[in-house]
Amino acid sequence: MSSEHNGGSSSQPDTAPGASASSGPRTLAEDLRTRDDSALAALLRARPDLLSPVPGDLTQLATRAGTRASVVRALEHLDRFTLQTAEALAIAPGAPPPPGAAPLEGPAAAEAALARLLPGAEAAARLRPALDELRARALVWGPPDRPRLVRTARELLTSPSPTGLGPTLAEAVAAAGPAKPAPSRLQEMLAAAGLTGTHDPVSALAALTALFDDPGRMAALLAGAPEGAEAVLRKLEWGPPYGTVDLEAPPPAVRWLLDRALLVPTGAEPGGGPGAPGSVVLPREVALHLRGGRAHQVLEPTAPQVAVARSYEPATVDATAAGQAMTAVATVEELLGLWEAEPPPVLRAGGLGVRDLKRTAAALDVSEPAAAGWIELAYVAGLVASDGEADEVYAPTPAYDDWLRAAPAERWAALAAAWYAATRTAGLVGERDPRGRNLAPLGPGLDRGPAPEVRQRALARLAGLAPGSAPDRDTLRDRLRWERPLLGNRAAARAGQPAGQPQTPQPGQSPGQPSGAVAAGAGEADGGRRLRSRLLDWALDEAETLGVTGRGALASYVRPLLVAEQDGGATHRAPGAAEEAVRAVAAKLAPHLPEPLTEVLLQADLTAVAPGPLERELAAFLAVLADVESKGGATVYRFTPGSVRRALDAGRTAADLHAFLAEHSSTPVPQPLTYLVDDVARRHGQVRVGAASSYVRCDDDALLTELLADRRSAPLRLRRLAPTVLASPAPPDQLLARLREAGYAPAAESAEGDVLLARPHAHRAPPRTPPEPVPEGPPPPDGSLLAAAVRAIRAGDHAATLTHKPKAPAAAPPEGGPPRTVMADTLATMQSATLSGTPVWIGYVNADGAASQRVIAPVKVEGGFVTGYDHTAEEVRTYPLHRITGVAEVAEG
């Protein structure tokens, strides 16, 4: 294990060939000690997983930075060229070999080898910034002229190498196992290659390696190859470097390559008998010669540009997006208005049932995937949740009432902000999880950690285009892939994407392109790419539907919502800044929204046309009085006997309806509509329904006779009790519904004979907090946490590397007890130590009366408490000042 894994305590430091111990830091921990506080803060900001919990010192920080999980997460946040630089550094000749392999002779300066592996003027210009980025993330350490990749990253990037390169000749021979060539066989290889024989296997391999590294001698050797030999090498040139061949009777060209170690056997396949095909590998030095020294077939030093597919006037984009924003607000309001009256049940496994999704989609007049998107949007905004009752249902939360009272622009801004940071992915609804269970709206399994980063990066790229420019999706996809080529691989694997392994071609076969995945097979990398591509398509489609974009271009009023980019990656916004951004978006959107209308156009065909958005109270009552016939730029309502009766059932009178129509109509109320209201009102309540089980009462006995004769009332089994009373075994609510379906206008009455008003019940869930996003890793820490963490780590490292002894206090502690000072001196010393960052000795008495002495590095003194790094407990702790008996400075000794 390398020294950077154990903080530098190893007796065999991980140094480059030819490097002396005094030429630079010997371990990652020593390298971190040479960095200033701003560099450590930048490291912790770029890799926030290193802060959980706060490391006790720089040795612990270095150890944690070298763990596999942390390195994989760090590699996922590199852009394409920085990752290619790390991949080249992992296979550079100056880099130390993996454990178990013999050290090779090579250039001492790995950076010089990198220039050969990454050729070109653009790559040369980007190489130093890429190395600086790797160093800032503690993936590279060492002197500037001898950059060293941490061992864990090197192992991840060479097993197998994303460059398609195989092991070195020495590594391939060492790992050959039973197929390892005997010393006599090595002598035959030297002779066949025209080299002087040697009885030392190490010297023999070194001689062959030197031959392969010499372009002139290597070209002369291949010039004498039989026909077909170079073609076999070319098949394995760009990887995968493994093939299969019958080692007992190989073709002449393959035999010639095996005799000169240009192909190295790796052993027979498992279970193979004599003559069974064996696996061979192309040594790295041979492949590099064939490639002309290039590590990558396609080098990508610069980010691809996002092409503009179409351009529009910015005013057109804003107007289109604002129209979609109004539709989004209205759709969410309609959805939750539906669910407050008829809340859907929660499935036993969680989520919304297929039948309820279909019903909601039909009510909203949208497709089922679109309905799932609106449902998830309301959920992440905290407007809907389960009520937690025995018969659990989904219902609006009290936050929905606050949302309704806000202005339209503020309502939309709240929805957009929730969508912007959400990890829940509605596009997965209808698919199945790895266990074969259906993914339902509001159910588990919809979170995808890369979703917000893909969404935010896509919008950031749109913001970088000229106003009114709609991007070409393919070039945008290429740009995001370049910025984060490994993003989504782990999420794809956890979500059950196929994670196959690279196929091993025969030397005569054409190999596939290397995956470029870290510690992942080709299938997993493909799954990550598919996930990123789908997340991008969903993000752009949702942005258009929500009103974030108009005709594919970013709306101007959305820009305050976009977070700034830091260290090449999108950052999380502090809560206060998020609220300020929402207010800024609402203020910029408001001028683009039309003023709510207070009037509609009533027409003689019993319809009403709303040419724009209506005031909320007007729209709410009109939705009760009429049925929505069509939506769009203008909403068409139709008045029917059923809709008028619905308004009367809600407690309105005919006079109320006439007054409402006259007040909110821009034209005189059409006579047919007046007649409709009067006709329905005249018949409303003539028939009364009560409990007998139920009864029907009416002063007009002729109407009851007609009702008895009506065939549609047969299932109700009505019978006459008196000239004006009928009885039925059906429940009152069922009797009311059946009579209304038959065209009558009954009204329910109480035991006292009063009419019961059927106002809809607005169901509410208890207060619920919106679901927290589930990112791939911890969010970046804020400045105060970073400063405190750096000070604690420095204090812990100071205590671990220096010898301390307490100064004798002014008054010696009685019988060797803890130091004693008055409270004023204690407070002053603590505040001074906090400002200077120096550790102090304290005497402390706990709640049980036990006294102890501790060395702490205070970072904050506030509210009667001191918070600092306790070197005794090796963690950050908080102590009440009134339990500290005294304080003394710590002297180095």
Image (cartoon, rainbow, N blue to C red):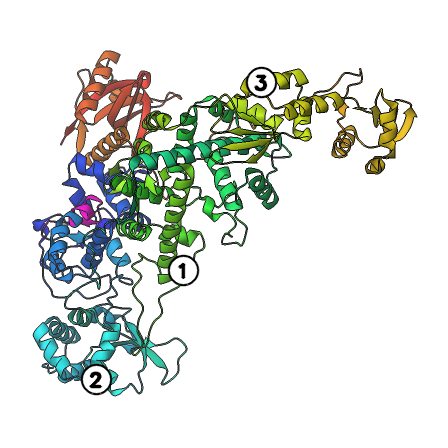
Q: Residue at x 64, y 25 (%)?
A: 673
Q: In which image quadrant can residue 879 be found?
A: top left
Q: Which residues are magenta?
A: 131-145
Q: In which image quadrant can residue 797 be found?
A: top left
In the shown orientation, is residue 671 left or right of residue 808?
right
Q: Which residue is mark 2?
A: 256
**Residue 421 image label:** none
The secondary structure type at the circle numbered 2 is helix
CA distance for labels 2 and 3: 100 Å
Q: Which comes sooner in the sequence, label 2 or label 3? A: 2
In the shown orientation, is residue 374 left or right of residue 710?
left
Near-viewer residue (339 or 807): 339
Place of residue 457 in the rendered image (x, y in percent of width and height, measured from the top left) = 30, 43
Mark 3 packing: few (<14 Cα in 10 Å), some, or many (20+)? some
Q: Tell me which amino acid carries mark 1.
A: Ala
Q: In which image quadrant can residue 461 be found?
A: top left
Mark 1 packing: few (<14 Cα in 10 Å), some, or many (20+)? some
CA distance for labels 1 and 2: 37 Å
Residue 231 drawn above or below residue 311: below
In the image, residue 133 lies in the stretch drawn in magenta: yes
Q: Which residue is mark 1?
A: 499
- Mark yes or no: residue 181 visible: no
CA distance for labels 1 and 3: 67 Å
> Dividing the image into 4 quarters, which one contains the N terminus?
bottom left
Q: Tell me which amino acid carries mark 3.
A: Ala
Place of residue 657 in the rendered image (x, y in percent of width and height, measured from the top left) = 63, 19
